[in-house]
Amino acid sequence: AQKITQTQPGMFVQEKEAVTLDCTYDTSDPSYGLFWYKQPSSGEMIFLIYQGSYDQQNATEGRYSLNFQKARKSANLVISASQLGDSAMYFCACRSTLGRLYFGRGTQLTVWP
Amino acid sequence: DTGVSQNPRHKITKRGQNVTFRCDPISEHNRLYWYRQTLGQGPEFLTYFQNEAQLEKSRLLSDRFSAERPKGSFSTLEIQRTEQGDSAMYLCASSLGARDTSESLHFGNGTRLTVT
């Protein structure tokens, strides 16, 4: 089984600044994928970004990038140029080839003007 | 692609009553997952289906919980003799089912259960 640790219950960032949300993981699977999801107050889980365990380069999707350090088992999410609409819960998750996702406890991000 | 649909959005029930939730996955998706999310926590895996076969159940899924996916299309999650501890958001997700770690799950908006 995998274990995901998100140590920041809440983070605050000013609009237009960058913010890093931390995630560490523990898995015995040789092949795995790391995901970040956003969950606004409305409740839906929105996929943001994916990083494969064998990917050499860090994943980027628009303003989102994933700082992947395999040896340290960390997969931090970096959001650049924060916007008010980025305020939400953010979940890190890990998936093996068996299919299901294991989630961390999440980080509540608040963007202030 | 109309997305994953869950009904009802909200359910309030009295302790001891039975409740049933429905999930309609994205039509071509073979895998369907149920998760439970309590306040301030991440989603916790409950069970998943590959087509109509239920392949795995979490220890969290007590005998009072049962899930079905007849004909490999929609799925239902039933909770019998509800307890206050069952109050949570129940999330359904679906995926194509490729043995590929890059495949993301597509989530519905969830059913929020409140047991009084």
Image (cartoon, rainbow, N blue to C red):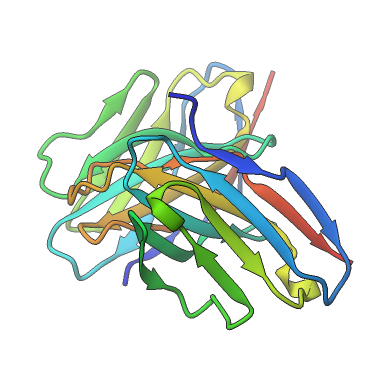
**Residue B112: x, y in percent?**
72, 51
> Where is A86 relative to A103, above or below?
above
**Residue A101: x, y in percent?**
37, 56
Viewer-proximal residue among B49 and B113:
B49
Q: Residue at 68%, 60% (x, y): give it.
A: B20
Viewer-proximal residue among B29 and A41:
B29
Q: Quadrant of residue B15?
A: bottom right
Quadrant containing the N terminus of chain A is bottom left
> Where is A22 relative to B58, above or below?
above
**Residue A7: x, y in percent?**
50, 58
Q: Quadrant of residue A83?
A: top right
Residue A54 visible to an observer of this rendering: yes
Q: Left or right? Give the position of B68 relative to A55.
A: right
Residue lying farthest bottom?
A: B63
Q: Residue at 18%, 66% (x, y): give it.
A: A29
Q: Left or right? Give the position of A65 relative to B24.
A: left
> Where is A73 relative to A112, above or below?
below
> Where is A77 relative to A70, above or below?
above
